[in-house]
């Protein structure tokens, strides 16, 4: 059975039908050498897709979100926090932020200037949180692996009359061509590292940005603390490339957010000579 045929079987499932085909084929290629039987390969691919993507989607989340957008008759959608909260609740990652949405997005907004451009990698439903931002950027590029998510965000941006865009993207294998003033990698690092060791740092190292936000979950999906803060923060800080510095970090109920900046080569050489910590 070829990679293409296996991918077609996976994409034939309603749960994964909207996932970027290139991502499905990549995971098929990575799995095909591990299993002899096609059914075992298909099972392994679906399991991986569930871990890195499907587990975060509330049942029928895209259908429910589209219904909310189609029925919307309020005022300014980009300031409507009631609608934003309903949309955010349909995705596990953003639903976990709802209790502290004001605090989290005010913290992020403190680093945003009105003329900035944001690249939100592995965005999920995070762009629906725009009403909680205290500063809206000039440009916003939302990147995700699910075509249904991309379509929903395009509709949302159009209703909000914002010149923002959404695009399919495989963060674990594709290179970003365009620079961004700000980069979001929110709760994405563990999923990238699962797929390809060092992938998250490689993205940050390759991109031209002023500020990057990297966050990690502090609790499991069931709400249990399993030493995730120590595990993620210690590894992240220990492996941080020398070209990046920790500007600030903030701990919320279920999320640790790192604010990163890029160092000039002159500063890097100076730090090497003097043995100064970057955090």
Image (cartoon, rainbow, N blue to C red):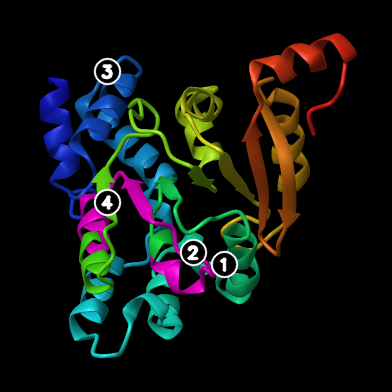
Q: Is residue 146 above or below residue 127?
A: above
How packed is label 1: few (under 14 Cα within 10 Å), some, or many (20 or more)? many
- Select label 4 or label 3 by which is in front: 4
- The 10 Å Cα crowd at callout 4, few under 14, some 14 to 19, many 20 or more, is many
SS for dot 3: loop
Residue 226 colored magenta? no
To which quarter of the image does residue 250 belong?
bottom right
Question: Which mark identifies residue 94?
Answer: 2
Q: Nearer the viewer, mark 4 or mark 2?
A: 4
Q: Position of residue 233 (x, y in %)?
A: 73, 39
Q: Is residue 138 magenta?
A: yes
Q: Please state the extent of the stretch shown in magenta in the rendering.
A: 128-153
Left or right: residue 173 compared with residue 279: left
Label 2–label 1 contact, CB within 8 A: yes
Classify 44 as above or below 264.
Answer: below
Give the Cα separation between the discs numbered 4 and 1: 22 Å
Q: Residue furthest bottom?
A: 74
Residue 156 position in % (x across, y down): 26, 68
Q: Earlier in the sequence, mark 4 or mark 3?
A: 3
Residue bearing the label numbered 1: 97
The percent coordinates of residue 93 (x first, y second) are: 49, 59
The residue wearing badge 4 is 166
Q: Which comes sooner in the sequence, label 2 or label 3?
A: 3
Q: Are marks 1 and 3 in contact (CB under 8 Å)?
A: no
The residue pinned by badge 3 equals 36
Q: Nearer the viewer, residue 194 or 12?
A: 194
In the rendered structure, are the residues bearing label 4 and label 2 in contact, judged by CB atoms less than 8 Å apart?
Answer: no
Q: Is residue 134 left or right of residue 77?
A: right
């Amino acid at each position: 059975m070829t990679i293409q045929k296996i991918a077609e079987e996976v994409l034939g499932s309603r749960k994964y039908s909207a996932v970027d085909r290139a991502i499905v084929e990549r995971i098929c290629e990575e799995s095909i050498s591990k299993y002899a039987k096609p059914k075992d390969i298909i099972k392994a691919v679906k399991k991986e897709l569930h871990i890195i993507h499907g587990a975060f989607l509330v049942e029928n989340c895209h259908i429910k979100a589209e219904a909310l957008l189609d029925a919307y008759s309020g005022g300014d959608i980009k300031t409507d926090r009631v609608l934003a909260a309903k949309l955010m609740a349909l995705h596990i990652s953003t639903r976990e932020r709802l209790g502290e949405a004001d605090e989290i997005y005010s913290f992020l907004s403190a680093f945003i200037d009105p003329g900035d451009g944001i690249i939100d990698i592995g965005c999920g439903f995070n762009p629906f949180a725009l009403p909680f931002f205290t500063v809206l950027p000039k440009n916003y590029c939302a990147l995700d692996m699910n075509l249904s998510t991309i379509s929903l965000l395009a509709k949302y941006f159009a209703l909000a009359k914002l010149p923002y865009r959404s695009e399919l993207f495989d963060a674990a294998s594709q290179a970003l061509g365009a620079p961004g003033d700000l980069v979001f990698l929110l709760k994405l690092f563990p999923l990238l590292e699962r797929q390809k060791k060092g992938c998250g740092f490689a993205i940050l190292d390759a991109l031209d940005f002023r500020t990057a936000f990297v966050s990690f979950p502090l609790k499991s999906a069931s709400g249990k603390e399993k030493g995730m803060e120590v595990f993620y923060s210690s590894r992240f800080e220990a492996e941080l490339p020398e070209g990046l510095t920790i500007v600030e970090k903030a701990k919320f109920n279920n999320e640790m957010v790192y604010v990163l900046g890029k160092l000039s080569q002159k500063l890097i050489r100076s730090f090497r000579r003097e043995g100064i910590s970057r955090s």
